Amino acid sequence: MPKKNSARFVVLGLLSHEPMSGYDIKQRVDRQMSYFWDLSYGQIYPALRSLEDDGLVTKEIEEGEGGPDRKVYTVTPAGHEALREWLMGPVETERIRYEILLKLTFGSHVAKDVNVERLEAFRERNEENLRMMEMYEDNLRNVLEQSEDHIYILLTVLMGKGIYRSHITWADQAIELLKERS
Amino acid sequence: MPKKNSARFVVLGLLSHEPMSGYDIKQRVDRQMSYFWDLSYGQIYPALRSLEDDGLVTKEIEEGEGGPDRKVYTVTPAGHEALREWLMGPVETERIRYEILLKLTFGSHVAKDVNVERLEAFRERNEENLRMMEMYEDNLRNVLEQSEDHIYILLTVLMGKGIYRSHITWADQAIELLKERS
DNA sequence: AAAGCCATGTAACCAGTTACATGATTCT
DNA sequence: AGAATCATGTAACTGGTTACATGGCTTT
């Protein structure tokens, strides 16, 4: 039974930090995990449904004051157990797709400027991402003692910083290399 | 018509470097692109079929001497045009999935050692990858003038080095952070 | 008035993996 | 003898995206 179903566990894990709605989960993933994971509503809502069916989470409906109703989900003891089991299991290796590297590999077929401009845009994007990570880091360090979870979240932020920094360094190096052999 | 079909273009791009078989394409991707892209036979053979149907590549059958027959594909002028068009188009942003970061985010639910061991294994894996990249780099630098493609391939290798180095640095930092707060 | 956010959900589609089938040759 | 490598391919499945539907509230 080698089913992966990672989406289920991402959802379960986030709910283990605190009870929330499907909408909240989407926000969290987009804002705090976007540099290493993503989830669409098309994955989240079916996952919540199936977690509930399996008794790993329970649902409570909050009347929406000035807005639609919210369905808030909470992890059950069985849910915590399932999460722990998944956490103890093996990690799969990173799946990474850099389309920019793909296009660069075949870069000799287009003008050099096309490649240089791509690299500059990439650099820009990563510069922004790095600044975001630095903000997260500051915020986290201020509340580090307030929860055991924070140190683990900090680790992921540090990885984000490292990745973005290495992207920027590489882009600079690559632009220079291309320019010097005009 | 927002179809992606990246597999088609990876195959087309590799064939633009030199004519080869589906099997060869798989080798190339696994050996020289594995750190930023991957393809399975289940993508390669259907892609070759459809590229041929669209007149972007032509097929020649080589009688296998001491082995099975090989079908060697060559890019047509229309194929080169299609490749160029794709190369000029926009790049999609990186899709990255670090399952290790996912499990680390929820790391407070398991013993600290589990997390530390994960990080150590990750570090080890990335050391090996870095060494591989350094070998590629040496080989490439020796033949840099022999083809216009080599400089572009070198750029991707440099990115690989940067990524792996930053993984290693991060893992060390993360292990230390976890250990010091026992 | 229009755009955007809050909030939930489904159906159709596209992308990618895995397991399987076939069969010869070469290496241990 | 058995495993690995060369070589091609398909079918069934799992995973994930996108477009759509609904509708109220808030901001420009």
Image (cartoon, coloured by chain):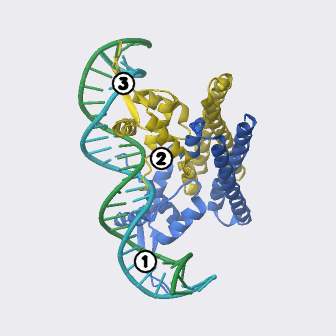
Chain colours: A yellow, B blue, C cyan, D green
Question: Of helix, strand and loop, which one carries label 3?
Answer: strand
User: Disc 2, disc 3: CB below 8 Å?
Assistant: no
Local packing at callout 3 (Cα closer than 10 Å; few below 14, some 14-19, many 20+) is few
Identify the subunit bearing mark 2: B
Count the numbered circles shown. 3
**Quarter holding residue B55:** bottom left
Local packing at callout 1 (Cα closer than 10 Å; few below 14, some 14-19, many 20+) is few
Identify the subunit bearing mark 3: A
Residue B151 location (% of width, % of height): 66, 58
Earlier residue among tags 2 and 1? 1
Residue at point 68%, 67% (across, down): B146
**B117 or B25: nearer the viewer:** B117
Q: Amino acid at mark 3?
A: Glu
Up-down: is C7 above or below A173?
above
Up-down: is A102 above or below A35?
below
Local packing at callout 2 (Cα closer than 10 Å; few below 14, some 14-19, many 20+) is few
Up-down: is A137 above or below B104?
above
Residue under pointer 1:
B60
- The circle on residue B89 is 2
- Report if residue A11 is visible in the image: no
Residue under pointer 3:
A60
Question: Of helix, strand and loop, which one carries label 2?
Answer: loop
Residue that sits furthest to the front in the current view:
A77
Residue at point 44%, 42% (across, down): A7
**B44 or A49: nearer the viewer:** A49
